[in-house]
Structures are given as structure tokens and as C-alpha cells.
Image (cartoon, rainbow, N blue to C red):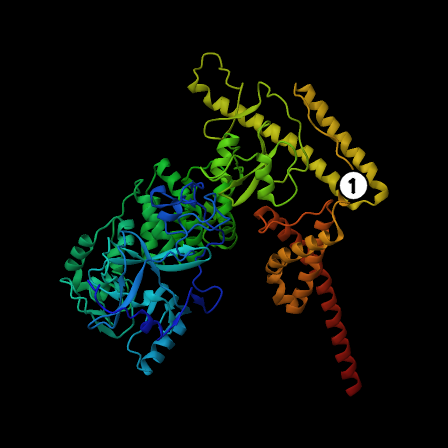
Amino acid sequence: MFLEDEDKTAEATSKFEVLDSCTYSSKTIGSSGQQEYMTCDCTEEWDSTTQRNMACSDESNCINRVTSVECINGHCGCGSDCQNQRFQNKQFASVSVFQTELKGYGLRADKIIPESSFIYEYIGEVIDETSFRKRMIDYDQKNFKHFYFMMLKNDSFIDATVKGSLARFCNHSCNPNAYVDKWVVGEKLRMGIFSKRAIQKGEEITFDYNVDRYGAQSQPCYCGEPNCIKFMGGKTQTDAALLLPDGISEALGVTAKQEKQWLKENKHLRSKQQGDDAIINEQFVRTLEVEPLTEIDVSKVMGALMKSQDLQIIKRLVERIFKTSDDSINSLIIRFHGYKTLSTIIKQFKDDDDALVEDILTILGKWPKFTRNKISSSQIENVIKDIESNTSNTTIKSLSSELLEAWGNLQMAYRIPKTKAENQASLYGRKGSRSPRSPRQISVELEGEDKLPDGWEVAFDKDSNSKYYFHRDLNISTWDRPASSVPIGPKSSTAESTNGSGSVTSAGTGSKKSGEGFRGDQEYTRREEERLRLEKEQMFSKLQDRERELQEMILQSGEEQRKKQIEERNKVQEKIRLQKEKMGLRAKTKSISNPSSKSATISTKSRQEIEAKWTHVLAKHVPNFIKKYEAEIARDNIKGCARDLVKTLVSKEMRKEPPVSPPKELDNHKLKKIKDYSKVFMEKFLVKYRLKQGNNKRSAEDDKTDVKKVKQ
């Protein structure tokens, strides 16, 4: 214990620049490899006493938390500022710096730190391997006594030597009380120090440096533990230094004791098994006989796959999944970001290991298939399409084709929340701290736009990171924002209702066939339910499409045609009402008044403010959608196209009556529409551009020919 030692924090921090967060030498370095934010299954849960969102806490079994992924506000159903945002909120433990006898400065706990607590983030400058090598030489020439490097990935390192955080003062120990863990935080990987056991007040905080290599120069170890390895690093690592990290060994299903026994028996072959630069016992990993996954193994394996960069470890972990045939376990793997994780691995190793890709494709083929939601949100379908188009391996091509065909038959699914009260409490409200709110109020708050049409509500689909809309009385749902209200009335005998889980089902379709029991008729019932659901969705989809077409016609037509178009739309809605009456439902559809009358309530200043907001929001996304064309048409043309595109898109939004302000963040559906429109715009531009370039080239060639003729 070092309770009585002088606090040297101020002195220590004066010798380097303290950073609040890591800096990156490039945009891509330190990337988590995730193109979409990973969401958990938790819902917000507010404590009325502390006014804190308790979702995703240690006891919640949050799939993000157990796989070392932080939740991001606005991209999860767990609500804002949940308990799984420790890196983002800098929830560091109370620590201070003190002077050790032989190791320079050290870091101690100022309060008791419970087991598995987040202590501090290892912060510094994130650099590539070339810069890392140069800095190692540079610091050595400058006679720096201590270097503070930590490997983030195989090709990126955190350098806290000149700029960093207090975490840089954690010393090495062969029997540490803390460990380093790699976390996915949005688009970046970040390193955190966590308590391995309860750490007492005044106790020095240490972790095992040999998780990461420190270069060719060995360093003496002063930890004083009975199991001390005496030296860290060096050209030839000791057997103890090459032991697998705890999280990886658990995911592989082995113990340190098993690995040490193998090393003892095969020590004489070490030089032939692997190179001096190896950071793990590679041959030991290759010879492992791994087992299929159990329910307990899933979170460990998926967490290790997200963080590991070593091909041999990844192959063994994938092999464990490959050997798993239990559908319930495979469903659990899917839930623990299975599609996103395997998608990342394929992209990383598709050109290096065909056998690994074949195994992953086989795994994907045998996984249970229910809906397209997780497949779509992971973007794995695009990865498989790319492989199918470019591979010369016939097995991979065949497996890819079969997989894409199977996925092509699936549909996106969304569920109508069970009850309004439960919906308010779990998705939008704070339990115990807010009064009940109506669905309309919820919709207005979420949309940041005009109120939704009568009967419509909005919910968030965590798998696809998108909002969808549902009509509770009619049990219909759609990804598109509804254009108007739809008739409401009592349910017929074949109308859909929601079951206890909140999923959409149908009533009045469970009649038994002659001679068959209820169990034997379940498949028949399921098919009937699906048929009725599809018929209803198709009917309303057609009506909504027609209404949208008419709305566009209203917006694009002149003032003299508006009245005629509005009358036509009202006729369509009257037909809808009559159809519903024939089905025995009472209609509540209201005719729509002239939309131009609403525009009078929007002042010129308000329109200008809305236009400015749309310009700002669209300008954040449009340049990224067309950046890939820069190589052909040059930067100036890209800027011009981006300005024209933004101007055109803003104009489209402002033609709506009344125009509405954009949300803070555009949803995926809206972004896809903008991206598609940008692509069409650029294709048209390229046709004109290439034609012009061709004419200019021919003109230049003609000029050269004329010059030659003159010279002759």
C-alpha cells in the first residue's frame, strides 16, 4: 500500500501534454471496421431517485457490454446516456500518481475499485507502424528513459510518450490486479484498463505489459512477484510472455495451465515453430482441438472475434462456430452481432485465406433464417455479392450464390408494440419519472416534424437502426412515413392482432383441417396468417403509393391545377372509405383541405430558417456520396456538383406545404434515397462531362495536326 506516499500527479503531468482523448494520424487508423453502429436489445430504464438511465448496466446482460462494444446515443433502443458509455463519458476511477522505488512513477487507487471496473482509458497519439518504428529510434537517440507505446492493432499503436493520460503511469506486474481490454466505440477501437480483482485504496494499479510487444530491447522487471519473468520484451520472448491473453484463451476453451504444459513438452521445437517476432504461441494455437460452442461460450467468442487481429486465433474461433449445430446457440450468435462480426472478418481476410471464407459462408448458410433485419443492418449482403463477382474459387462462388438466393427470399420484419402504455415506458418514457404521454406526443417529439396522420405511431427498429411507422388499430406497419390517415374501425374476423411478444399475428385463421390436430395444423395457420398479412400490406401499400404520386403532382403543378389535383385525391380517399365499409369497417377518413392554405402560417423568415437547416444537414452527407467520382472529374467539379445537388434537394424539401425542419440526424431510409438520387445526378453529369472531354480532346488533336502541317 502506498497511502502515505506523496501525491506526484501535478509533477508528473507537467512532463507531458495531457490529452482528453486520442488523436489520430489519419482518418482510417484505429478503425473498428464497423460501418454501422452496433445496437443492443436493452430498453431504457430510468431510476426515479437518481434520474439516471440504468439500461446496459453490469446486471443487464447487455450484448454490447459483454462483447466490449459501447452503445452510442441515438443508435440504440436503450435510451440516452445508458450505463454502457464509460469511454465516451470518461467515467474514470479516482487515481493519483506517486513515486516508486525502482520503476519511476506509478498509479495508485485513491478509493476502493470493485472487480471488473473501468479504471482509465489508455490515451495518446494513434500512429501507424512506420511512424512507430521511427519514434522508437528517435526516442532512443533523445535518451528517453521511458517509452509509452501500446499496440492497438497489428498496424497501429498508441504513443503516450509525449501526449497521453494518467493511464501511461500504470506499471507492469507478473501478477497484476488490472488488465487491458480493447473496446469498439463507434468508428474507433479504444484501449481501457479494467480491474482484474477488487483493488484496495492506496494499492498500485498494474497490468501485464506482455499483452503487447515493446521491441527488440529487453527491460528488467521490478514487480517483485514470486512468478516474475525477470525481463520484458527482447528479441526472444520468454514462454510466459507468449501466453494467450485471458479473454482469448477462454474463447478458445483452453487454460494457461494447458498452454504451459504444451510449451514444456514442445520447448525444443520452439525455434522451428515460429519466428522471433511472434506475440503468441502460434503452433499451440494451430494444434488446438476446439469444441462447439455452448451458451456460455457465445459472448466470449464473439467478443474475442471483434477484437482479435491474429489470423490463427480467428480461424480457431470460427472453427468453433463452424462445429456448432444447435439452432438455439446459432440464434444466440446472430444476436451477439454475428452477421456484422463475420462480415468484418470476410472483408479483412478474403484475399488471404479461401478456406476461412468457405467456412464462414457455410456457417452463414446453416444459420436460422427468419427475417432480413440483421442481414440488412450488418451490410453483409454487399460483402457476399462482392465475393461472388470477383472470386475465381468455384466453391466460394457457389456458396455465395446459394446464400444470396436464400436471403433474397426473406422479408424485413417489424413489430407493433404490445400496448401503448408499455410502448411509452420501454421505448420512449422514463420509468417512474415521467407522466404518461399520448402516442401523438411521442410521434411529434421523435419526428421533429409535423404531427403524424391520425392513428399512426412511430417506433425504432434496433436491427436496422431505422424508424418505422405503425397503425395500431389496423395492425399495419411500414418503413415509409405515412402520407395521410387511413380508415379505422372494428377488426374483422381475419384482422391481425398482436400476441404477447408484440409480434404481428392474425385472428380467425386457426380452423383445423379434417382429421388433423392443432399441432399438425400450425404450419397451415402460419401460412394463412402470412398470406393475409401480405395481402393487407400490399393493398395499403398500393393506396399509399397512389397518394404519394398525387402529392408529388400537387407539389409540382402550378396554382391553376392545384384544386383539380386535390379533388382527385379526395376521390381516391373516398374510394378507400367505401372499400372499408364493404369490409364492415367504420371509416374516419377526413377530406384533405387545400395544402396551400397552410403555407400562409409559415412566415418568410421561418422558411428561410428551414431552408438553411436543410442546406446544413444535406451538406454533411452529399459530398461523401459523390466523393468517389473525384478521381475522374477533379475536386473543383466535385464541389460544384455537391453544391448543385444540395441546392436541388433543398428545393425539393421546400416545395412541401408546409416545409418542415429536418431532424438532427437523417435516418437510413432517407439517406439511401439521397444517395440514390446523387448517383443518378452524377451519372447524368458524367455523360455530359465525358462527351465534353472527348470533344476537347479531339479539338486538341486537330490543333496539333494543323501545327504539324504548318511546320511541314
- Picture quadrant of residue 176: bottom left
* Image side of residue 519 versus residue 667, left or right: left
Asked if residue 458 can be seen in this view, the reply is yes
To which residue does mark 1 refer? Answer: 597
Tell me the residue at 58%/23% (across/down).
495
Q: Nearer the viewer, residue 641 or 649?
A: 649
* Image side of residue 246 versus residue 28, left or right: left
Where is residue 686? Give x, y as percent: 69, 61
Where is residue 314? Give x, y as percent: 34, 54
Q: Report the amino acid beneath label 1.
A: Ser
Q: Nearer the viewer, residue 418 or 187?
A: 418
* Image side of residue 531 versus residue 301, left or right: right
* Image side of residue 421 versus residue 562, left or right: left
Tell me the residue at 27%/50% (across/down).
250
Q: Counting other residues with Cα less than 10 Å from the Cα at mark 1, is it few (<14), some (14-19), or many (20 or more)?
A: few
Judged from the image, the secondary structure of the residue bearing numbered disc 1 is helix
Where is residue 649? Give x, y as percent: 69, 53
